[in-house]
């Protein structure tokens, strides 16, 4: 079930938002030999640039299939990424341990649940998500203990798990890396970061704002890696 | 956060499909004193009667809010409830331990994740789901060990959990009840089962088929409870 009918590669579902982290994660999954199925969620995020970037990225990587699932999380409200709540700006990376307004309640839980559903129908046992617990925004659903709990639950949730046909693994190859390490890893794997998009608050000319948490972390990563960001500094 | 601004009742999110089990669960949550927020998912199920029933049920119960989330699980395929796969029929209740074609991969995980997101934004700590591990269809995501694993994960997933503001509880008041006990409990709480819908395969005249797992389990419940089903036997 878990092998590719056209070859002998194992299948993996990779969550792809179009940002720096998920793009690097896709490159890592591909380099590890998986046949990749990319999953993006159109959840009512503030701007379409993120999903456009996801499409560019998966086209460049030649994934086997790309599912874009529509799920309007604005119905539940209360996030600066989906609703009309001001974005925090100009925060120092080491002050991002408090959970910001950009937190979307249960977002990774919902995304991983969708990935689990697809994995089961594909006969895939491997799910990749680009969470990072080092240079991150303080989101609870990026921490290793959360991912471990999700994996334990996933193996009780599914027909494939119960019947012993599958043992699901949630791969988090970036979880202990710095943003600089992520950029270096991506460069090594030939990732074209010009395809990606990170900014939470794109400017009218289609440029990154340079002030949101995501821009600040991205800039720190490229700077510390000694690599220019193809998107500029915003 | 968890109290009703108009009173002192705690809020709860209740998953409501419009069937016998979830309707009884809603009655139990209300009787326990919760202010109920009903959540239904339009996931591409074969027929609309299920969502119509959910609307009738929540109207009758006077819930505070009813969210119907659109999420097309047909993209992932492979279930008799969403795709063009034949429904199993005329199975004996005690032969339903094998997982049937009506299994929707990771369905309860996805539904509970959505409930968790809404609970967090509402400041609710309580989520109700009408899973049943006795007279059930053999779905892995109805078992107590699965629910416990989901609850453990939920308490690591959220800002409210991490900050110690909330301790989420997944309530499964039906999990150890027989279908007959469920019907009796609902009768005691004044549930009008004429509002509900259980059948997976409604007939052209809008009658239940009487042959799918859901009809068979429902009929067994009413019969053993000694109560006539207001929808008839199909």
Image (cartoon, coloured by chain):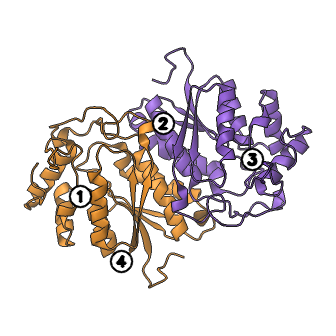
Chain colours: A purple, B orange
Mark drawn on residue B20: 1
Q: Are marks 2 and 3 on the same chain?
A: yes
Circle 3 packing at 10 Å, graded few (<14), some (14-19), many (20+), is: many
Determine the chain carrying the residue at label 4.
Answer: B
Between circles 4 and 1, the one closer to the viewer is: 1
Q: Mark 4–mark 3 contact, CB under 8 Å? A: no
**Secondary structure of residue under mark 2:** helix
Discs 4 and 3 lie in a common subunit = no
Which chain does the numbered disc 3 sit on?
A
Residue tagged by mark 3?
Answer: A198
Give the chain of mark 2: A
User: Are labels 4 and 2 on one chain?
Assistant: no
Q: Chain of mark 1?
A: B
Mark 1: few/some/many CA within 10 Å (<14, 14-19, 20+): many
User: Which of these two is toward me, B143 or B182?
Assistant: B182
Spot occupied by residue A93 in the image (x, y as percentages of width and height): 82, 56
Q: Are marks 4 and 1 on the same chain?
A: yes
Residue A118 is marked as 2
Task: Residue under label 4, please give it.
Answer: B33
* Same chain for the residues under marks 2 and 1 in the image: no
């Amino acid at each position: 079930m878990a092998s590719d009918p056209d070859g002998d590669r194992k299948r993996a579902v990779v969550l792809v938002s179009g940002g720096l982290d998920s793009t690097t994660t896709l490159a890592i999954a591909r380099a590890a030999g998986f046949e990749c199925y990319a999953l993006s969620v159109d959840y009512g995020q503030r701007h379409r640039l993120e999903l456009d970037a996801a499409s560019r990225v998966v086209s460049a990587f030649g994934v086997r299939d790309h599912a874009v699932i529509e799920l309007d999380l604005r119905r539940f409200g209360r996030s600066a990424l989906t609703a009309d709540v001001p974005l925090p700006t100009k925060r120092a990376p080491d002050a991002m341990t408090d959970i910001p307004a950009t937190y979307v309640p249960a977002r990774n839980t919902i995304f991983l649940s969708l990935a689990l559903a697809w994995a089961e129908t594909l006969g895939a046992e491997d799910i990749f998500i680009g969470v990072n617990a080092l240079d991150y925004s303080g989101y609870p659903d990026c921490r290793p203990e959360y991912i471990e709990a999700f994996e334990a639950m996933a193996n009780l949730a599914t027909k494939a798990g119960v019947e012993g046909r599958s043992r699901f693994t949630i791969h988090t190859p970036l979880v202990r890396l710095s943003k600089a390490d992520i950029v270096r890893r991506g460069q090594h794997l030939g990732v074209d970061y010009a395809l990606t998009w990170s900014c939470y608050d794109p400017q009218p000319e289609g440029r990154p704002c340079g002030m949101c948490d995501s821009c600040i972390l991205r800039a720190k990563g490229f700077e510390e890696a000694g690599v220019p960001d193809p998107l500029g500094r915003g």
